[in-house]
Image (cartoon, grey):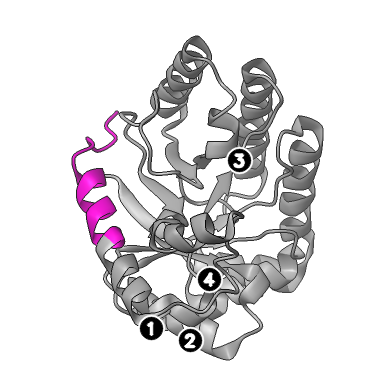
């Protein structure tokens, strides 16, 4: 079963309490009520994923510990292979040399999500190979830092640029990585629409789509995108978000679980 993690505005976290997976953003983690929500959800056995964004890794790990996070998304630069690999390399090296960060990770034992990037599918594939090699080297040198299997993230923005044949290449590569390295897969910023990747058994997807749909009428009326992180929702829009979260969770349950 593929699980949905809704990317949620801080003030509306209560709309997603029934989810099994939650997507937290380190950018908002200086807000005590934001942190407390994910602490409580983690205590209930929910799987919390923390997106690093561009926050320094020492702060990210501190927030992850406060929220009892299960997985940390390593910072990446969209469509930029070189910068993405550089950030991942710096992240793991800093985790190894910063004593407090190292000790926190030793106790927390999260998994890590690396998000390959590139302009073409071949750039993406090379980036994926470099990130996996980096992960395996860190696991050999510092097994305490990465005690769990790697998750590979794939962004919807990258997928949207691919042809049908290029999508097939990405799917084949994800399947190979899963079998060769036991990687999990996560689709970031899922748009809710059909695509050649929809039937790939992602462990989880993250998306703002329930909020996007709830506010679609306003976006049409204003003839411009609506900032879901800033917009105040009406009661009917809040009910719509709950309905869409339920709808997409049911839709994703029809996908098959990842198997070796």
* 235 left or right of 172 in image: left
| Distance Cα–Cα, label 4 vs label 1 | 19 Å
Q: Nearer the viewer, mark 2 or mark 4?
A: 2
Disc number placed over residue 115 in the picture, else none: 3
Identify which residue is drawn at 48% across, 19% down. Answer: 167
Q: Up-down: is 81 above or below 164?
A: below
**Could you say where residue 180 lies in the image, as x and y percent from the top left?**
44, 23
Tag 1's secondary structure? helix
Identify which residue is drawn at 62% across, 78% down. Answer: 29
From where the camera sits, is residue 38 visible? no
From where the camera sits, is residue 226 visible? yes
**Could you say where residue 85 lies in the image, as x and y percent from the top left?**
75, 37
Q: Nearer the viewer, mark 4 or mark 1?
A: 1
Bin the neighbour count of mark 1 within 10 Å (Cα to Cα): few under 14, some 14-19, many 20 and up. Answer: some
Disc number placed over residue 40 in the picture, else none: 1
Q: Check contact, mark 4 vs mark 1: CB within 8 A.
A: no
Task: State which quadrant residue 100 falls in.
Answer: bottom right
Q: Up-down: is 67 above or below 47?
A: below
| Distance Cα–Cα, label 2 vs label 1 | 6 Å
Q: Return the disc, 3 or 4, that comes first in the chain's sequence.
A: 4
Residue that badge 2 annotates: 36
- The residue segment tinted magenta is 244-260
Residue that badge 4 annotates: 107
Q: Check contact, mark 2 vs mark 1: CB within 8 A.
A: yes
Q: Return the disc, 3 or 1, that comes first in the chain's sequence.
A: 1
Residue sitting nearer the eye, 217 or 113:
217
């Amino acid at each position: 079963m593929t699980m949905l993690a809704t990317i949620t505005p801080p003030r509306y976290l209560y709309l997603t309490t029934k989810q099994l997976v939650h997507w937290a953003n380190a950018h908002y983690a200086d807000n005590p009520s934001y942190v407390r929500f994910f602490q409580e959800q983690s205590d209930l056995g929910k799987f919390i994923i923390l997106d690093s964004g561009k926050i320094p890794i020492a702060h990210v790990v501190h927030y992850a510990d406060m929220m009892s996070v299960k997985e940390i998304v390593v910072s990446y630069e969209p469509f930029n292979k070189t910068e993405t690999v550089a950030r991942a390399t710096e992240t793991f090296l800093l985790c190894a040399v910063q004593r407090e960060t190292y000790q926190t990770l030793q106790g927390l034992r999260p998994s890590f999500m690396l998000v390959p990037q590139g302009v073409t599918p071949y750039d993406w594939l090379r980036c994926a190979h470099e990130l996996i090699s980096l992960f395996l080297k860190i696991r050999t040198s510092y097994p305490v830092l990465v005690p769990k299997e790697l998750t590979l993230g794939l962004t919807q923005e990258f997928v949207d640029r691919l042809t049908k044949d290029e999508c097939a290449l990405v799917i084949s590569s994800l399947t190979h990585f899963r079998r060769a390295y036991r990687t999990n897969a996560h689709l970031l910023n899922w748009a809710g629409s059909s695509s050649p990747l929809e039937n790939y058994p992602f462990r989880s997807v993250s998306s703002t789509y329930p909020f996007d749909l709830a506010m679609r009428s306003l976006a049409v009326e204003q003839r411009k995108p609506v900032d879901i992180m800033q917009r105040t929702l009406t009661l009917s829009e809040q009910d719509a978000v709950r309905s869409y979260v339920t709808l997409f969770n049911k839709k994703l349950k029809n996908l098959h679980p990842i198997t070796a």
